[in-house]
Image (cartoon, rainbow, N blue to C red):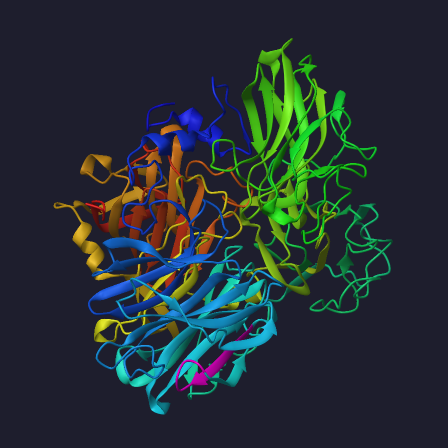
Amino acid sequence: MSSARVSRQARLRMATVVTVCALSAATLAPWACAADDAPAYTETYRPQFHFTPQKNWMNDPNGLVYYQGEYHLFYQYNPNGNSWGDMSWGHAVSKDLVHWEELPLALAHDDEEMVFSGGAVVDRDNTTGFGTKENPAMVAIYTSAYKDGGKQAQSLAYSTDRGRTWTKYQGNPVIDIGSRDFRDPKVQWYAPTKSWLMTVSLSAEHKVLFYSSKNLKDWELQSEFGPAGAAGGVWECPDLFPLAVDGDSRRIKWVLVVNLNPGGIAGGSAAQYFVGDFDGKTFTPEDKGSYTPPAGDVVQDFEGTGFGDWTATGSAFGQGPATGAVDGQGTVSGFDGKGLANSFHGGDGATGVLTSAPFTVKSPYLNFKIGGGRHPHEAGTVLDSTPPEGTVLADFEGGTYGDWTATGDAFGTAPATGTLPGQQQVSGYLGSGLVNTFRNGDSTTGTLTSPEFTVDKKYIGFLVGGGNHPAGSGHPTVIELLVDGRVVRSATGKDAEALNWASWDVGDLAGKKARIRIVDDNTGGWGHLNVDHIVLSDNPAQRVSQETSVNLIVDGKVVRSATGTDSEALDWASFDMRPFAGRQARIQIRDMNTGGWGHVLADRFTAADRPAESVVRRADWADYGRDYYAAVSWEDAPGGKRYMIGWMNNWDYGQSVPTSPWRGAQSVPREMALRTIDGRIRLTSKPVSSLESLRLAGPATASGLSVKSTSKSLTGLGAQGKALDIEATFSLGDADRFGLKVRTGAGGEETVIGYDATTQQLYVDRSRSGAGDFHSLFSTGVETAPLKAEKGKVKLRILVDWSSVEVFGGSGQAVITDQIFPDPSSTGVEVFAEGGTATLDGLRAWQLKSARQ
């Protein structure tokens, strides 16, 4: 594995939770091998026209401002590692929003604070006194995240040399309300009142606050907005800006962007927006009216005293429907009538399954209400939590580590008995003891090594949780198997406190002497590991379901699944039943989780002709993909343009993506506009025009190409590559679905970009896009965005990079951004149609050169 082109098998092995290597030296994660040997910006998954720092962790874009010919991009940055931690402001500049120059660190964390997200302005009138009118200061308004106590407040820093060096204001903080969830200020000049306007998030309360100031130092609260729209998770990184509707400068509306995590449209992180009016003090959104779900036949409404012909196992659901909240539970809302299924009987520690009688699928959709915990179904998991039989090497019971040897301070003097101070709830371990290295938080390090034993069975199984820092990364959190002093197997957590089973196949090591070593060498985010019940067995340990979900079961398999949003409020969800028409099915409500939010709520199962839409589905989104978050816009862009950029990642799995020595990318900057579409004002976006400067001459073209229920390669026309800019127009025909497949190739890899004519939705399916099993939440589901055909045609603009796709549908009202991690040899492009015929009216596909050239 010395070559930069790691084998396909190695790359797939890299992506698994259990990384298995047999090397003559310390085990390295395969992507680390590739990254170490490859020149900078040629690594396997390195974006070629999306900004990434040369090394280390990056997340939210910050401080977006244009000044003296330069677009400034500051960003959340860890100068000391490849995972979240030591938050500071990195810095890059560009003259065209495409070619970026990375500059030295701008605002550094220190002993007192981390430097969280915020904005930047040019103080042209020298209202602060930090500069002069001849040489105005650039002022950063950021969130001070204080290390002692966790308080968040708003602070200032300034630069008088075009952002190259910075000084923190001695009077910081300038706004302090004593909150731990008060962050991400975005500031602009509001000309009508000749004052500064701050838009900032009170994140846990799902509110945006508006402040006004004459000098950036003294602020007065004007109003607050929210909760509204999608209000799961936390609200972060708000932005407020005016745009002309349909290009009419006499008709101005204001756009309020509120980034949400979790609870986004595709799960996890996303950028929501509201359109309305702003009078200098108050933002008033447009009234979208009330929602009435589709009518249908009620299958189960839980209004009786019992569950009827539904069967309950375990204790979580009680003896019958609940009438709201049960003992120890917060207020439950959103259910219909008097009853609902509620698995909080006995608290989050109880588990159980509630299953319907079999029925024949006759209706196109099954609508229902769901609430409770956000623990999605994971394919391949089992309901039986019985550990594999065999020789237990360690169960960490009895209050000591026995003859295991500890170094450092991460393991304490004895096994933990559960969750440690300051830690999220730990679950999934057996008995009362486990290894838990969250001693004094993530700051401690050390090793714990077993005595020597003989490998005399086929598998070693164990429970593992905690941080995802694999062997070969700079600072691992791993459990390792050592033979002759060499690491031959390793595994890590998934950035979750819940432990679950993993196994090593050790059949080839029969008779060998071995040791287990648990390593915590990480002091950043998720810099700890949880381990329990290590067992030698002739059977592999199987991952156990930890879901809180409603599932549709057909032929014994879960074919549809939905979960809650960590909320006691129920909301509508819907299953598309059309592929299963005429077949036997069951509805199954599962609570297999004993950790935080380890319960599920469900009600009002209804067979209907149309899908019900949740609050999340009815909200407006700047992007409907999994990987567009913390979206904010540039101030003072030339020509009054409004450009926006987002972090191209998702907090669900952001610290697990298989990239090194960097982790995190920014989206392509997008030009924003307001357009009237189907009678509603919608926020639209398109890639900045300067991106076209990367197009190589002579695009591949196609026209009038009809496909019927098949796929056709376009490689022969020259449409292929790892970095592409594609423009395509389709005529509907009678096909159910049609579109393009990109990055096709090795082992059936493909990223499907399609249009579903039956639901009028744009979609992206990355389930076969390459490496994806590095985290259970990465490749789940198909992302969809509402998009009506215009005069029987669908227009697409598709940007393909080495590890992402960005799809712009129609006039840019339907956008989907997703990361992908395909094999470098997967470079094909195909056109496809399903269930009939569609016509590719026209296609132009340019290969793109690197923005680094």
Residue lying at 45% horizontally and 45% vertically, measured from the top left: 81
| 175, 239: nearer the viewer | 175
Position of 476 with respect to 89 (left or right) is: right
Q: Residue furthest top?
A: 511
Residue lying at 21% horizontally and 69% vertically, measured from the top left: 68
**The N terminus sits in image quarter:** top left
Position of 508 with respect to 623 (left or right) is: right
Q: Residue furthest bottom?
A: 193
Where is residue 72, by image quadrant?
bottom left
Magenta region: 207-217
Residue 49 percent coordinates (x, y): 27, 49
Residue 127 percent coordinates (x, y): 34, 84
| 115, 638: nearer the viewer | 115
Examine the residues drawn in magenta and state their main secondary structure: strand
Q: Is residue 276 visible?
A: yes
Where is residue 758, by image quadrant?
bottom left
